[in-house]
Image (cartoon, grey):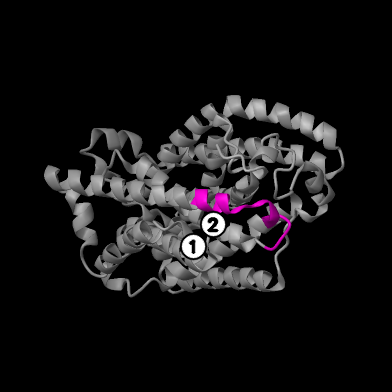
C-alpha cells in the first residue's frame, strides 16, 4: 500500500467499537463503580483507595508509555514502527482520565474524605519519618500534593502537544489537503526530532517522581534508587503487551492492512527484551537488599513473604518472566494470535499483580485480605475507562499516521 492508496481509503482509517466491545466497556464501568460503592459502604475505604491507586497508576503508565515510545522513535527517525505508532499514541487518551482520578484522590487526602489520609502512613503520622532527614524534608503533605499535581498536569500537557501536532497533520490529509498535509508533516518531523529528546528527559524525571511519591512512599522508611527504572521496565513491557493485543484486534480493518508481520515480530522482540530487563532490575533489588541486610530495606520484602501476599510473590515472576522468557524465543510466538495474545495477557495480569504487591500490603491488613475481589472489580472499571478513551481517540483521529513522511518507507519494508 502506498500514499495514494491510503488517500483513497482515508475515511476508513477511524475505529469504532463493535456492539460486543461496547457491551464489554459498559459492563466494566458498571462493575468498577459497583465495586467502589460496595467497598466504601462496606467499611473498606482504605482498600478501595489503594485499589484505585494501583489500577489507575498501572493504566496511566501504559498510556504514558504510548507517548514515550513515540518520542523514542521520533528522536532517532525510526521507520519500522510507523504503521502501528498511532495505535499506542491512542493509549495516551487515558492520561486525562487518570489525571482526574489522581487529583480527586489528592483532594480526598487533603480533605480526609473516606479515610483517604490513611493510605499514606506518613501523612497520618508525620513522626514516622522524623528520624530520616531527607524523608522528613521531602515527604511533606502539601509539598507532595502540589508537586505531584503539577507533574501530572505537565505530563499530560507535553503528551497532548506531542501527539496533537501529528494528529493535526493527519487530519489535514483526511480532509483532502494532501499536499499541504505532507508538507506540514515534514515540519512536524523536524520539530519532533529536535524536541523529543528534552520531552523524554522530562518524562523520565516526572514519572520517576510520581513513582517515588505515590508508590514507594506507601512504605515511608523503605527506599530504592532503582525504583524509577523498575517502573519504566514494567511500563514498557506492559505497553508492548497492550500494543500487540490492539494490533491483533485491528487486523481485519483498514488500519490493520498497513501492519505487516515485521511489526508484530519487532514489537514482540521488544516485549521479550523488556521481560529480561524487568527481571534484571528485580533481581538487582533483591540481591542488594540481601547482602546489605539493613532492617529498613529487608522489612519491605519480609512483610510480603507472609501469607496471603506470598502466593502472589511466587506467581508474579513466573508469569511475568519465566514463561515469557522461553515462550517468546520462537519467532512464531511473536506473530501468531493464539500464542501471542495469551502471552501478552499473561504479562499484563502478572504486572498488575506486581503493582498489587507494591500497594495493598501497605494499605490492607493481611488478616483482612481474603482475595483480590475488590482490586479486580476496580480494575475492571479502570480498564473500561481505558478502552473508552482509546475508542474515543480512534473515532476522532485517523489510526494510521497517513501524513508521516517516514510511513511510505515503513510500508515498503523499511526496517530501521
Q: Position of residue 137 (x, y in %)?
A: 32, 33
The residues colored magenta run: 252-267
Element at badge 2? Answer: helix
For this view, does 345 lie left or right of residue 223?
Answer: right
Q: Residue at x 83, y 32 (%)?
A: 180
Q: Are marks 2 and 1 in contact (CB under 8 Å)?
A: yes
**Helix, strand or loop under label 1:** helix
Q: Residue at x 20, y 38 (%)?
A: 131
- In percent of the image, x 55 and y 73: which residue is there? 31
Residue 265 colored in magenta in the image: yes
Q: Is residue 221 visible?
A: no
Q: Residue 340 got which mark?
A: 1
| Position in image of residue 46 (x %, y %) | 40, 62
Q: What secondary structure prevails in the magenta region?
A: helix
Residue lying at the far right in this picture: please name it: 176
Q: Nearer the viewer, residue 220 or 348?
A: 348
Above or below: residue 303 compared with residue 139 = below
Quick one: label 1, few (<14), some, or many (20+) residues within 10 Å?
many
Q: Position of residue 43 (x, y in %)?
A: 41, 71
Compare marks 2 and 1 and give the one earlier in the sequence.
2
Provide residue 374's location: percent of width, then percent of height: 43, 70
Residue 244: numbered disc = 2
Q: Is residue 174 left or right of residue 277?
A: right
**Gap in Å between the C-alphas at discs 2 and 1?**
8 Å
Residue at horizontal 55%, vertical 63%? 383
Quadrant showing the C terminus: top right
Q: How many neighbours does mark 2 have within 10 angstroms: few (below 14), some (14-19), or many (20 or more)?
A: many
Residue 337 appears in the rendering: yes
On the rendered structure, is 315 left or right of 234? left
Q: Nearer the viewer, residue 116 or 91?
A: 91
Amino acid at each position: 500500500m502506498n500514499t495514494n492508496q491510503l488517500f483513497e481509503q482515508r475515511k476508513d482509517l477511524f475505529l469504532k467499537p463493535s456492539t460486543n466491545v461496547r457491551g464489554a466497556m459498559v459492563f466494566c464501568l458498571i462493575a468498577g463503580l459497583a465495586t467502589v460503592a460496595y467497598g466504601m459502604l462496606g467499611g473498606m475505604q482504605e482498600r478501595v483507595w489503594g485499589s484505585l491507586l494501583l489500577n489507575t497508576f498501572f493504566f496511566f503508565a501504559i498510556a504514558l508509555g504510548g507517548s514515550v515510545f513515540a518520542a523514542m522513535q521520533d528522536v532517532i527517525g525510526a521507520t519500522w514502527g510507523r504503521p502501528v505508532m498511532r495505535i499506542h499514541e491512542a493509549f495516551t487518551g487515558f492520561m486525562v482520565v487518570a489525571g482526574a482520578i489522581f487529583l480527586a484522590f489528592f483532594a480526598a487526602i487533603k480533605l480526609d474524605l473516606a479515610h483517604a489520609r490513611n493510605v499514606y502512613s506518613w501523612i497520618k503520622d508525620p513522626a514516622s519519618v522524623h528520624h530520616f532527614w531527607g524523608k522528613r524534608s521531602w515527604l511533606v503533605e502539601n509539598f507532595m500534593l502540589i508537586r505531584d499535581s503539577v507533574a501530572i498536569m505537565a505530563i499530560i500537557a507535553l503528551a497532548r502537544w506531542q501527539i496533537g501536532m501529528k494528529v493535526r497533520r493527519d487530519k489535514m490529509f483526511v480532509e483532502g489537503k494532501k499536499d499541504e498535509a505532507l508538507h506540514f508533516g515534514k515540519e512536524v518531523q523536524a520539530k519532533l526530532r529536535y524536541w523529543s529528546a528534552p520531552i523524554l528527559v522530562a518524562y523520565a524525571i516526572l514519572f520517576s517522581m510520581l513513582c517515588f511519591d505515590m508508590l514507594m512512599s506507601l512504605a515511608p522508611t523503605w527506599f530504592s534508587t532503582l525504583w524509577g527504572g523498575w517502573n519504566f521496565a514494567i511500563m514498557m513491557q506492559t505497553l508492548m503487551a497492550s500494543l500487540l493485543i490492539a494490533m491483533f484486534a485491528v487486523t481485519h480493518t483498514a488500519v490493520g492492512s498497513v501492519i505487516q508481520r515485521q511489526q508484530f515480530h519487532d514489537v514482540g522482540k521488544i516485549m521479550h527484551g523488556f521481560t529480561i530487563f524487568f527481571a534484571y532490575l528485580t533481581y538487582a533489588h533483591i540481591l542488594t537488599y540481601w547482602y546489605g541486610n539493613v532492617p529498613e530495606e529487608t522489612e519491605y520484602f519480609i512483610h510480603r513473604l507472609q501469607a496471603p501476599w506470598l502466593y502472589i510473590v511466587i506467581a508474579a515472576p513466573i508469569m511475568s518472566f519465566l514463561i515469557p522468557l522461553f515462550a517468546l524465543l520462537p519467532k512464531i510466538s511473536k506473530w501468531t494470535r493464539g500464542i501471542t495474545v495469551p502471552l501478552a495477557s499473561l504479562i499484563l495480569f502478572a504486572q498488575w499483580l506486581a503493582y498489587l504487591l507494591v500497594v495493598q500490603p501497605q494499605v490492607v491488613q493481611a488478616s483482612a485480605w481474603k482475595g483480590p475481589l475488590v482490586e479486580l472489580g476496580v480494575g475492571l472499571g479502570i480498564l473500561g475507562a481505558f478502552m473508552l478513551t482509546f475508542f474515543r481517540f480512534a473515532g476522532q483521529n485517523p489510526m494510521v499516521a497517513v501524513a508521516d513522511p517516514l510511513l511510505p518507507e515503513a510500508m515498503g519494508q523499511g526496517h530501521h
